Image (spheres, rainbow, N blue to C red):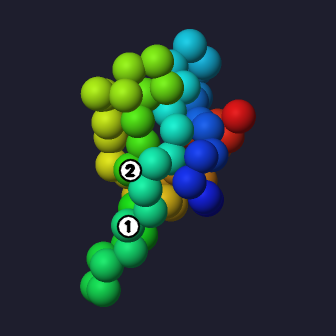
Amino acid sequence: MAIGDRFCRTGQVSRVFVVVQLDSRAGLPPHARLQLEEDPCERITIALAALGDPAMFRRL
């Protein structure tokens, strides 16, 4: 994963999220902060393992 990568939730191709930050802290699994492409005010934080799971997200 890298900043600028684009993803959509599986089955929700109309909502595109963009990776804006990668977060890796000692003792915690790595996460990515994503923002909705059409509304930068809407953000989510998700584990990289979940982001890489094709049952949950699809890279665009």
Tag 1's secondary structure? Answer: strand
Answer left or right for 3 relative to 40: right
Q: Position of residue 56 (x, y in %)?
A: 53, 39
Residue 9 in view here: no
- Does 49 appear above or below 7? below
Residue 60 or 38: which is nearer the viewer? 38
Residue 17 or 8: which is nearer the viewer? 17
- Does 20 appear above or below 18? below
Name which quarter of the figure residue 40 lies in.
Answer: top left
| Residue identified by numbered label 2 | 33
Q: Position of residue 31 (x, y in %)?
A: 40, 62
Q: Quadrant of the N terminus?
A: bottom right
Amino acid type, residue under disc 1 in the picture: Asp
Residue 8 in view here: yes
Characterize the local packing of mark 2: few (<14), some (14-19) or many (20 or more) Cα atoms within 10 angstroms. some
Q: Residue furthest bottom?
A: 26
- Could you tell me if the residues under marks 2 and 1 are in contact, i.e. CB atoms within 8 Å? yes
